[in-house]
Image (tube, rainbow, N blue to C red):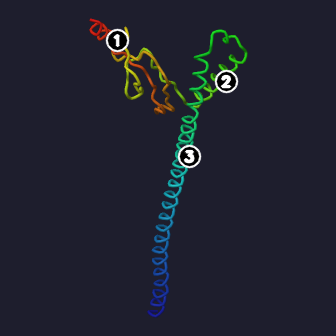
Amino acid sequence: MTKVMTKEKHEQQPEEQATDQDASRIAELEKQAEELRLGWQRTQADFVNFKRQTEQDRKRLIKLANSELIARLLPVLDNFELATRHLPAELETNNWAIGIKFIEKQIFDILENEGLERISSVGTQFNPEVHEAIEMVESDRPENEVVEEVNSGYRFDGVLLRPAKVKVSIGYENNSQTSK
């Protein structure tokens, strides 16, 4: 009987041993599976971030290209503005002149819808960040006030594209002192 018990005991040991090996193998595989799952999640998050960054880069590139194109169109807009500003009074009702004014407005409206903004200058204080003084003039306006805009200044999406070229008042106090 002793041999039988030993045999039974001997038969149980490999099963227990196998179970312990299986349990450690299962634990090892579960750990590997968890590491793979976490790696997959990180990769998925990295891909989402990559897509977002790529989209932001694409939008930034489009804005840059648009700003460069718009900056190149500003002289054309200036020429239309000059043409309509110096239009003789007798041509105000001329269909051709009206068409030129319409084209100027249409071009500006399109550019404005894309993010172009004209900088208001006349009657404001001279600001070197948005104005370029081309002349200081005697005026009855306060000192450093913009009295005339020679060329319009523009911003595109809040970024200065071109400063306004302006004439700035030296002030009425200086006028009275100069005339004495």
Pinpoint residue 146: horizontal percent, then vertical percent: 41, 17
Above or below — where is 23 with respect to 156? below
Q: How many marks?
A: 3
Report the disc number at residue 99: none
Location of residue 163 by image quarter: top left
Q: Which residue is mark 2?
A: 103
**Residue drawn at 38 percent across, 11 percent down:** 139
Nearest the viewer among 179 and 160 is: 179
Circle 2/circle 3 CB separation < 8 Å: no
Which class describes the residues within 10 Å of circle 3: few (<14), some (14-19), or many (20+)?
Answer: few
Q: Foreground: 175 or 53?
A: 175
Q: Say which quadrant the C terminus sits in.
A: top left
Q: Which element carries disc 3, helix, strand or loop?
A: helix
> Dot 3 corresponds to which residue?
58
> Which marked residue is nearer to the observer: mark 1 or mark 3?
1
Mark 1 to mark 2: distance in Å? 36 Å
> Crowdedness of circle 2 by 10 Å Cα count: few (<14), some, many (20+)?
some
Q: Quadrant of residue 135?
A: top left
User: Where does residue 52 sit, x and y in percent of width and height?
Assistant: 53, 47
Q: Is residue 173 left or right of residue 70?
A: left
Label 1, on which residue? 142
Do residues under tags 1 and 3 come within 8 Å of each other at their CB atoms? Answer: no
